[in-house]
Amino acid sequence: MIHTGRHFLQIPGPTNVPDRVLRAIDSPVLDHRGPEFAKLGMDVLENIRPIFQTTGSVIIYPASGSGAWESAIVNTLSSGDRVLMFETGHFSLLWRQVAERFDLKVEYVPGNWRGGAVASEVEARLGSDRQHTFKAVMVVHNETSTGVTSQISEVRRAMNNVHHPALLMVDTISSLASTDYRHEEWEVDVTIGGSQKGLMLPPGLSFNAISEKALSANKQAKLPRSYWDWQEMLKYNQTGFFPYTPATNLLYGLREALLMLHEEGLPNVFRRHARHAEAARVAVRNWGLEIVCENPGEYSNSVTVAFMPEGHDADRLRNVILENFDMSIGAGLSKLTGKVFRIGHLGSFNDLMLAGTLSGIEMGLAVAGVPHRKGGVTAALQSLLETKTKAEPVMLGK
Ligand code: PLP
């Protein structure tokens, strides 16, 4: 089938890259040891900090998010260290695997893939660890496979309540620049980020925002590291350079994306995402489908995940939507394969893109013969209208 117009890329990352960012990437490649690069390097290294809500260092790797997972581990821990993790879904499972490959002893708190990290569990397990054998608590902030956002401020409070010195490491790959996240205020030691979601860039960059405590741990950490070594990075970054060839053109894109986020203002970015997420949930509920996230306090701003009715395959629905309406929506991952579909509503996104996305799904449900109620889109539009007048008065002349 020939498709006309733009493809709708509504997976929860990689997300749509705005034209401004594409134009910025489409620049001549420059000498990464020359003076022009140093300006670009200094610019992005400085302006990325507020996105993590930190005044401390942020390391930028030419790597996908999984690289930044690995670097958080090898820079701060030693073989045999005990760490606490939560089974929130597919991505917590993968991060756990990385930890185990480095011979960390992972205490993995079981979960049903419908909730986030449980602060009371953190408090109980760390509270009874009088010898301070736990060296880190590692949490996926926004579990992209389930649409559940863990409450990091509560995890931090639980750690402080029992005065436990473990490091706190948080994966914000699908929440950065779409959900309020405060690296410094929540005393997070390593925050892991990626370029291809809220940051509106193509895949290929990832980040470690690091605390002073993480830097001290780095001096003692014995795991072998070379490519990921923070000290080498920090040394070169002082003058805007990198110890190896950086992804120069993605950094042009990053400079533009940061400018766009600063122009909009982070609080507005978070409000926009929250509003779209709410409207997406309204649609799902009105279709009569069940949202995977059980606790409204943990609803994700960036992705909504819905169960299929019993006996209906989500991947078939996704194929019907792709073939008929040229839209990609997210697949269920590992044990949720075929059982759920995921609606990405993050990054460069607006009301009409959400309306189009939800329309494609509602029509797809009809074409695929999946039992549902009509009217999800209409209800979502109503939600958008109501929240528009309350939260975002229309500014004429701006
Ligand atoms: N963590 C989360 C929460 C993710 O959503 C992803 C990817 O989608 C990753 C980690 C892995 O990142 P990457 O695929 O860029 O290596």
Image (cartoon, helix red, strand yellow):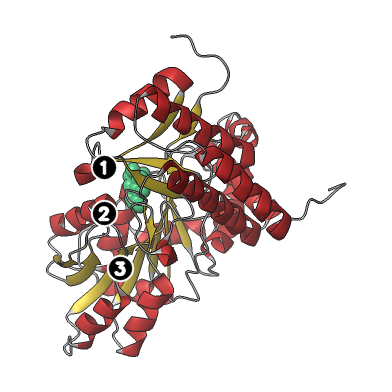
Dot 1 amino acid type: Leu
List the residue tagged with mark 1.
Answer: 333
Q: Position of residue 40 (x, y in %)?
A: 60, 47
Tell me the residue at 43%/59% (across/down): 299
Q: Could you tell whether 328 is left or right of 384 in the image? A: left
Tell me the residue at 12%/69% (across/down): 80
Q: Could you tell whether 353 is left or right of 230 in the image? A: right
Q: In this view, does 232 lie above or below 11?
A: below
Task: Pick whichever of labels 1 and 2 is earlier in the sequence.
Answer: 2
Residue 89 visible? The answer is yes
Q: In which quarter of the image is residue 163?
A: bottom left
Between the residue at mark 2 and the residue at mark 3, the CA separation in whole angstroms equals 11 Å
Label 3 neighbour load within 10 Å: few <14, some 14-19, many 20+: many
Dot 2 amino acid type: Gly
Q: In terms of secondary structure, where does tag 3 sit?
A: loop
List the residue tagged with mark 2.
Answer: 89
Dot 3 amino acid type: Ala
Between the residue at mark 1 and the residue at mark 2, the CA separation in whole angstroms equals 9 Å
